[in-house]
Image: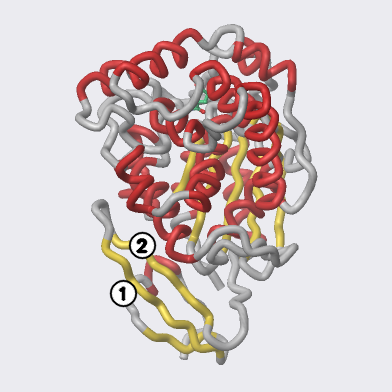
Amino acid sequence: MKKVCHYRCVRLIEIQIYNSKLIFIKTNIFHRNTILYIYSISTISNMSFKYEDVENIYKKIKSMKQKGKNADYIPDLQIVNPNIYAISVCNVKGEIMNFGDYRTEVGIESTSKVFTLALALNMYSIKKLISRVGDKDEKREFNSIKDVLEIKNHTINSFVNAGAMATTSLLYDKTKTNDMNEKAMNKIILENMEDFAGRTLKVNEHLYLSEYKTSHHNQLLIDKLVSYRRFYGDPQTVLKSYTKQCSVMVTSKDIAVMAATLANNGTNPITHKKLVNEEKVEYIVDHMAQHGLYNESEQWWESTHFPAKSGVGGVIMIVIPGVMGIGIVSPPLNKYGNSFKGVETGKLLANIPIY
Ligand code: GLN
């Protein structure tokens, strides 16, 4: 019987009594390491961090010298306030704690790839998804053309730009016109993210146009995929939809709830709406553990053991299966295109206990 349980310490324990609740811990072996799935058999676990522990990390990282730089290849991201900094935590019971600028919205950018993957998995089997897109390791940056040329399946995985756009293209319905598809895809992508967040979200049209007008690089990635027959919808329609999905505005609190939905086996802990089945949640979380932070994924995994997904707007989303979701926002990025302070925050969060 333990009062305090540390996520890292419980890793290898199979069954444990915690606060008189029986928690069953199932381990799954993945390529990179082991991910824990913790299921509370009696009541839903209300484990979380201690408020003061997260507050201390918030204060420490807030005063830390900023070594990152806002993304500059999307004009609107360059002018976002670099001092925005927020942490939100939401456990699988829906209990939330917030720190800093948790009401400030930023572009979700690549963190949206997680939710479009969930949508695609609601339409296709995991097997089909792997054959159409795949789960190969990236070798270079998140939008590398060289990787698309050199990596055998070309689409790489659902979290680099090429594979993410191919994943979005799986939502394209070939029996409908491009116009109809654009409307339908925009609608389901936004509604799905709203279901994960448990509130109405908005597309930032200005951010969308700022990226769409300068998206020649993504266009080139799509052209390559089309030439390899690894793209499954009309290129322009999908590019627009993909860019729109990246321009949805979210707060750290939204991200924490969205992550907690994945931690809670696909059921939003606040609205109780079931969004993805368990087997597919495992694929998504596994994908996050392997590819969530691009070519910093391995380093991140080694220092945190947190499945996570970043975005160039400065978001880092962390899922601790069976326990909680975490949203961190800080726009300046490190050399891998991940939030500099977000990564530093994650590393410290990995070293505090969960009670
Ligand atoms: N919208 C961005 C792009 O397509 C997302 C990239 C990211 O967040 N890493 O380049």
Question: Residue at horizontal 27%, vertical 58%?
Answer: 30
Cα–Cα gap, marks 2 and 1 = 10 Å
Horizontal placement of 323 versus 164: left or right? right
Question: Residue at horizontal 46%, vertical 73%?
Answer: 38
Q: Toward the viewer: 63 or 109? A: 109
* Residue 60 picture quarter: top right
Horizontal placement of 326 versus 205: left or right? left
The amino acid marked with disc number 2 is: Ile
Q: Toward the viewer: 132 or 110? A: 132
Q: Quadrant of the C terminus?
A: bottom right
The residue pinned by badge 2 equals: 35
Horizontal placement of 347 versus 102: left or right? left
Residue 55 visible within the image: no
Question: Residue at horizontal 37%, vertical 75%?
Answer: 26
Could you tell me which secondary element the residue under label 1 belongs to?
Answer: loop
Mark 2 crowdedness (10 Å alpha carbons): few <14, some 14-19, many ≥20: many
Residue 25 visible within the image: yes
Q: How is the image coloured?
A: secondary structure
